[in-house]
Image (cartoon, coloured by chain):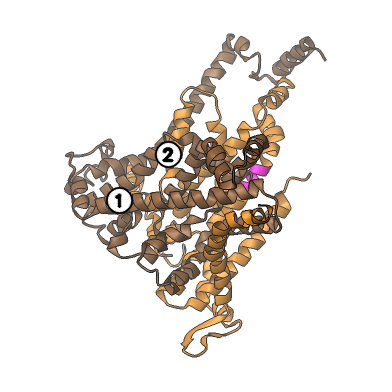
Chain colours: A brown, B orange
Amino acid sequence: MDIRQETSAQTQASTTAGLPVAGPRAEQRARSGWASLSRIGRHVAIYGVLIVIAILVLAPLEWVAASSFTTRETVWKHVLPFSWRAFLPDHFTLDGYRQIFEAGYGRTMANTFVLGTVTVVLSLTVGSLAGFTFARFEFRGKRFLWAVTLISFMVPYEATVIPAYTLVNDLGWINSWQALIVPAIANGTVIFLFRQFFAEIPQDLIDAGRVDGATWPRILAGIVLPLTRPVIITSAIIIFLSQWNSFFWPQLVAPDAKYRVVQVAVNILGVEQQTSYWDRLFAATTIAALVPLVLVIPLQRYYVSSIVSSGIKG
Amino acid sequence: MARSERWTPYLFLLPAMVLLLFWRLVPLAAGLRESFYGNALNLTTGREWVGLDNFRYLFDDPTFWKSIRVTFLFNAIVNPLQVALAVLLALVANQKVRGIAFFRTILLLPVAISINIATLAWGIALDTNYGLVNGILEAVGLERQPFLRSADQAMPTMVAIVSWIGVPFWMLFILAGLQSIPGDLIEAARIDGATRVKAFFGITLPLLRRVILFVLVADTVINFTLFAPPYLLTRGGPSQTTNLMMYDAWKRGFVYGDLGSSAAMVTILLGMLCLVLLFQFAFLRPKH
């Protein structure tokens, strides 16, 4: 069938169906009345849906952020009865922020940053070594060890929390940094991402290093690692966010105020001081939500690819 | 040199394997083992082997059965709903219109923030007495709703909150799947006279099958073992209508100190989860 016949068949189809069909000729048809109207209609519908979804996503977050700059007394003023001014700070103030920082939120944030950073460094070291080995070595038991990695990666974390807590308790690690760091170091997703990445590096590059007599650690550090920027950024985001966002584990194994992390602080404000100190709760929540967003939005290309590749290929 | 090289891969894998074993697989095995042990601590013999007693105890407990019903009901609603909405949202996010990149960025916000913050913010927004949503309902002339405080509405409200996080997350996978479908394929079908709807059901959806199956399975794992929303918002109530099994297991272990029945509950939950996943694979796996 040549192109001309195809086009005529298409025209016929669209006339008999009585509906305009978008396609390679859409622009041409768009100039005639109905088609262009339906094109406009389509755009109106798409933007309508986009706006509704965007409002559903943004409204609660925006409301929390706006309320964090509002005085405790007026925080509900525009909520009941409702007016759109609920989404703007009423009597702008930084009082909530001042109070939480006076109560140690700065220390809490520093704790979480250090915890996240240390875990990232350890997790990338362990994960890149394992990923490299799975991608580049042949050895006895490789399939078995890979299966172990995959299984441990698929076991739902929640189902192992209680026994893991018992383990931490037996080790005498309750209220310690290692209780927060050590269980988070080996991460199946990170091992997986590094394996994918190393599997795609050309063998010639590595052979060249081997011929020059370089040892494996030298090859890894000198040849391979400089190429790994994307996978390092991606893995670092996963690990840092998982530490920044975790609330249940730290609350369980390190309840002492000395080890307080951001999400635990938010929960304490939310549960214990809810009824009176709204300004503090909203301020702490805003900061706790803002940090992941500041990290993820500029790096979203890496973030999305990390999420998607860990899933689809797995 | 060759001799030392033979051990190199094992050396490189050692830290990762030890840590995975110690923190993922050992706790899993310990949990399964715990289901067969009692709570009384005997100083000479340690915990006592009680066989199936923990399971028998659970089977006689109406709370356990209620919790199973609630978990299944919750999953029967939330998983198909999230997958369907994620597909629809991916179709919207895949439209090539101006500003779509900005829209996709907005959709990342619920994915990036913690479940803790998301449930907390929605919990306050949906509060019966002072919540934002009730304010808006009243402003448009509708009645206030109790949401999480009513036995009828708590579960649907929890489904909505969980989906606010889940749908944009799973959308990312479906969107990636959509973008991997060659545009020519759909274009060709459209030239042959297929409508948009027909092209979607005839071509796009079958090609997305693998991704959708993955999303369904992964979503099911997460929602079967869901813990944070009942823990943070409802404490399983009202009248145990949101008493999901993972939350109930935690409560048995940590609040009532009954580690045996808590572990047995997790064992049953994992067993049921495996069955559900097998079922999903058997019926939905692409046939080729």
> Circle 1 marks a residue in which chain?
A
Q: Amino acid at mark 2?
A: Val
- Point out the residue furthest to the bottom here: B44
Instruction: Find residue B256 and report its horizontal and vertical position in percent.
Output: 42, 77
Name the image quarter holding residue A57.
top left
State which region is magenta.
Answer: B210-215
One can see residue B93 in this view: yes
- Would residue A7 appear left or right of A68 to someone viewing this image? right
Q: Which residue is mark 2?
A: A296
- Would residue A187 appear left or right of A23 to someone viewing this image? left
Q: Amino acid at mark 1?
A: Ala
**Which of A300/B137 is in front?**
A300
Is the magenta region chiefly helix, strand or loop?
helix
Q: Which mark is residue A68?
A: none
Image depth: mark 1 or mark 2 in front: 1
Instruction: Find residue B58 and report its horizontal and vertical position in percent.
Output: 55, 77
**Which of B139/B161 is in front?**
B161
Image quarter where the C terminus of chain B lies is: top right
Q: Which mark is residue A110?
A: 1
Instruction: Find residue B180 and report its horizontal and vertical position in percent.
Output: 64, 32
Mark 1 or mark 2: which comes first in sequence? Answer: 1
Establish if B249 lies above or below A242: below
B212 inside magenta stretch: yes
Name the image quarter holding residue A69.
top left
> Circle 2 marks a residue in which chain?
A
**Which of A49/A109 is in front?**
A109
